[in-house]
């Protein structure tokens, strides 16, 4: 029975109905006022399976990978904030590097990179009592000429809807 189940999974992967790789999931989203600048709104997002074993192997093989977060915040249909945040991951001398920070093992790397925090709005006071939508699209690139997004079981996209309060 297990052999038949595995065979069906393989056929579904080959036909493109199912991905061999795990889907990137969002475990938690927290939207908050920036502590240093009250005119900025930030978000902290915790992902699951952002770096799966295939990404880890590519990084350990000496390839630098960039996770790119495209941020667009809308007031209705009007774009009011746009940014791009890049997290660079590499491996040298048995250490992982994330934007210059040294991490000594895979677990620390996965724990660190799975939680991202960035600005999603500036000029907060202009939007008091308004509902805003922030769209976050996630892409990845590397030194290789390969479509890395295929290593995710889905195309990660997050839409956060929130109301600005004083």
Image (tube, rainbow, N blue to C red):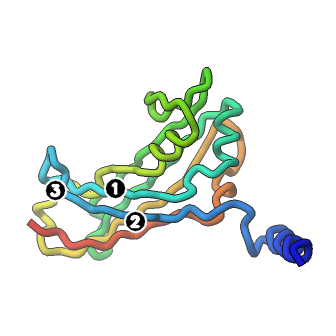
Disc 1 element: strand
Whether 106 is drawn above or below 116: the answer is above
Determine which residue is flagged by label 2. Answer: 135
Which quarter of the figure has residue 77? bottom left
Q: Which comes sooner in the sequence, label 3 or label 2?
A: 3
Image check: 17 left or right of 121?
Answer: right
Nearer-the-camera pick, 78 or 40: 40
Instruction: Give the CA separation, mark 3 to mark 1.
Output: 19 Å
Image check: 40 left or right of 136?
Answer: left
Q: Position of residue 16 (x, y in %)?
A: 77, 71
Disc 1 packing (10 Å; few <14; some 14–19; many ≥20): some
Q: Residue at x 64, y 55 (%)?
A: 149
Nearer-the-camera pick, 137 or 52: 52
Residues marked 3 and 1 touching at CB (< 8 Å):
no
Nearer-the-camera pick, 149 or 74: 149
Q: Position of residue 32 (x, y in %)?
A: 22, 59
Determine which residue is flagged by label 1. Answer: 44
Whether 19 is drawn above or below 96: the answer is below
The residue mark sitting in front, 3 or 1, is 1
Disc 2 element: strand
């Amino acid at each position: 029975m297990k052999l038949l189940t595995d065979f069906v999974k393989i056929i579904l992967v080959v036909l493109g109905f199912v991905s061999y790789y795990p889907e990137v999931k969002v475990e938690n989203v927290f939207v908050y006022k920036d502590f240093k600048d009250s005119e900025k709104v930030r978000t902290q997002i915790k992902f699951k399976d952002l770096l799966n074993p295939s990404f880890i192997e590519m990084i350990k093989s000496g390839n630098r990978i960039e996770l790119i977060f495209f941020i667009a915040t809308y007031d209705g249909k009007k774009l009011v904030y746009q940014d791009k945040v890049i997290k660079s991951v590499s491996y040298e001398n048995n250490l992982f590097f994330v934007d210059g920070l040294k991490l000594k093992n895979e677990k620390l790397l996965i724990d660190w990179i799975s939680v991202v925090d960035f600005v999603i709005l500036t000029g907060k006071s202009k939007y008091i009592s308004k509902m805003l939508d922030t769209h976050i699209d996630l892409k990845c690139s590397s030194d290789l000429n390969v479509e890395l997004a295929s290593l995710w079981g889905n195309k990660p996209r997050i839409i956060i809807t929130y109301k600005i309060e004083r």
